[in-house]
Amino acid sequence: MYETIALNMKCADNIAVLTGAGVSTASGIPDFRSTEGLWTEDHAREYYMSSDYFFHDPEDFWKKYKAIFRMKLLKDYQPNLVHQFIKDLETDEREVSVVTQNVDGLHSLAGSSRVLEYHGTLNKSSCLNCGRSYSLDEVMKVNVPECDHCGEILKPDVLLFGDLITAHEEAEAIIEKADLLLVMGTSLLVTPFNLLPYLAFEQNGTTSVIINNEPTEKDPLFDYVVHEDLTIAVEQLKSRGL
């Protein structure tokens, strides 16, 4: 199957890549939603990581936010073989667009040219009052980051529970242009992100591939399904000329 997948990828002019937490686990970042992930440890985290809680108690929100996302460790994480593989798919003849659920910024750090961060990013925070943006380094200097212009407590640019998804239409447009959809490292449980593969399923001429370490409910939508550790799968594809 790897030979066929590699051949389809080589022939593709426009590849859309959807990625989830499984892509970043090899960099040491926990998969928050897997059966072994951190979200299973305390379901109250969904309450604390919500817009409602941010507006209710922003000081305590920031304390819990930094602890849950292990913010002090974020700068220690680096792109891994999978991020690099996706970046290297880009050529002068082939356009590759990444739509990622991950908020760690590693696709951009790996050098991918077109990255849509579907759930936002941990690397920036913004003032809702005046719109100023602040880097992760600035946010980590204090326990509760405030805007140095108007004094409002900053809100992280990561999508919180209760926030509106603003990137879905852009993600749909990326898939509609693609002649190959590659899904990697996601269980496809989160709505509306998990609706995106249906677009490729309904389009004539769009080849679809999913590579994940365990089966997903959406596997029947794909032309090719690989259940394998992503690092091993990437090595297999690279050995076939990718």
Image (cartoon, helix red, strand yellow):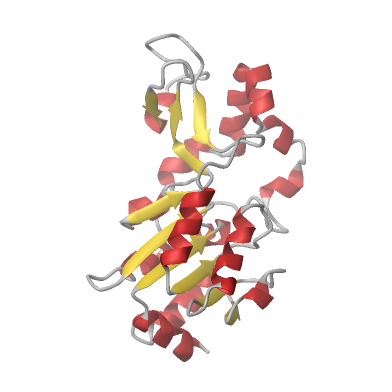
Residue drawn at x 58%, y 24% as measured from the top left: 62
Residue drawn at x 61%, y 19% as measured from the top left: 58
On the image, the x and y values in percent for residue 72 come to 49, 35
Q: Quadrant of residue 20?
A: bottom right
On the image, the x and y values in percent for residue 99 come to 47, 56
Q: Quadrant of the C terminus?
A: bottom left
Q: Is residue 78 in view from this perspective?
A: no
Residue drawn at x 34%, y 51% as measured from the top left: 109
Residue drawn at x 76%, y 36% as measured from the top left: 44
Quick one: which residue is furthest to the left in this view? 92
On the image, the x and y values in percent for residue 169 come to 51, 50
Q: How many marks?
A: 0
Nearer-the-camera pick, 53 or 170: 170
Nearer-the-camera pick, 157 or 14: 14
Q: Quadrant of residue 8?
A: bottom left
Would residue 79 appear left or right of 62 to someone viewing this image? left
Q: Is residue 121 in view from this perspective?
A: yes
Quick one: which residue is furthest to the top in this view? 150
On the image, the x and y values in percent for residue 37 come to 68, 53
Q: Vertically, is 146 above or below 220?
A: above
Q: Vertically, is 2 above or below 153?
A: below
